[in-house]
Amino acid sequence: MSKLFDLTGKVAVAIGGNSTLGSSMAKGLAAEGAKIAIVGRNLEKAEAVVKEIEEEGGSAKAFQGDVSDLESIERAANEIKEWSGGWDIILNAPGKNSSTPFMELAPEEWDDIMDVNLRGLVFSTQIFAKQMIEQDRQGSIINISSVSSTTPLSRVFTYSASKAGVNSVTQYLAKEFAPHGIRVNAIIPGFFPAEQNRKILDEDRIESIMKHTPMNRFGEPEELKGAAVYLASDKASGFVTGSFLRVDGGYGSMTI
């Protein structure tokens, strides 16, 4: 009898797979048998994630790529193709944040965050999805959004706008790629101890978040693994596309 979440024989490209949350989800995919390409701006960090995956018996390789530099993503895609022949799963987990108040926001900062969180995600997806379509390789694209995409939060204006854009892109591409057998969904994480959100978590902010989180705690990166594996598995979520899977401790169920 086949295993519902078995990813043996699949190749996953984890863009931003060297980040706190991206690496956890990549490890989750590897634990279910997927071969993982870790793509990150910092190659040393990517190689550290590869080492952890290999120590657990998985197969992975690190590739340098920065979504704000699409030539580097094109190069990484070619290198991954040479390494694995192709891919079945794309995990889009790049992320950049800022706590600059709206009235102090400069165009340069807006562009910088949008280049990573939205523009970079769109055009790196274009690069990798094109190869999937040309190879008639059906599979799954998983975008990482945020609770701030549906409930805009103070202090993270640009980040919230970029992640709302990710939601729109997810639904558009779900329709665009459905005829090719490629499913496109997004995970909406709540508050996790990732590098990009620590800068906004002062004592008052933590208290406010906890008031609106029924489980009254932050998430642990490992708690995103199941969501990623579910959306990656054609057996488990083969009829799921254009959807958002919240992993937020109940935050999205509260009125703010």
Image (tube, rainbow, N blue to C red):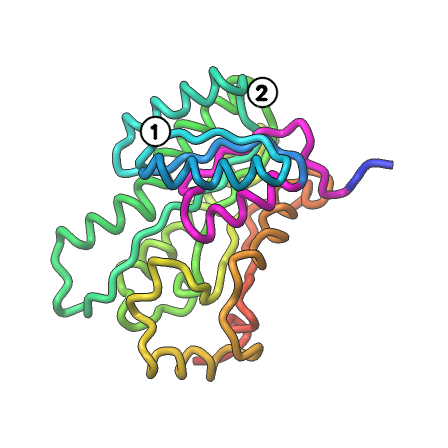
Residue located beneath label 1 in the image: 73
Inspect this view and state whether residue 220 appears: yes
Q: Are marks 1 and 2 in contact (CB under 8 Å)?
A: no
- Image location of residue 78, percent across then percent down: 41, 19
Residue 179 appears anywhere in the view? no
| Residue at image coords 47%, 41% | 49
Query: What's under tag 1, amino acid-wise?
Result: Ile
> Is 75 drawn above or below residue 173 in the view shown?
above
Magenta-tinted stretch: 4-31
Specify the quadrant of the image occupied by residue 182: top right
Residue 172: x, y in percent?
Answer: 46, 43
Residue wearing tag 2: 136
Q: Residue 221: x percent and y percent? A: 51, 58
Q: Nearer the viewer, residue 38 or 227?
A: 38
Residue 91 pos. (x, y %): 49, 41
Residue located at (52% from left, 39% from top): 141
- Mark found first going from the N terminus, 1 or 2: 1
Which of 4/122 is in front? 4
Crowding near pointer 1: few (<14 within 10 Å), some, many (20+)? many
**Looking at the figure, which quarter contains the N terminus?**
top right
For the residue marked with disc 2, what is the amino acid?
A: Asp
Q: Which mark, by number, is residue 151? A: none
Q: Residue furthest right?
A: 1
Query: Which element is circle 2 on?
Result: loop
Identified at 47% across, 15% down, the residue is 82
Farthest residue in the front direction? 55
- Left or right, residue 115 beside residue 228: left
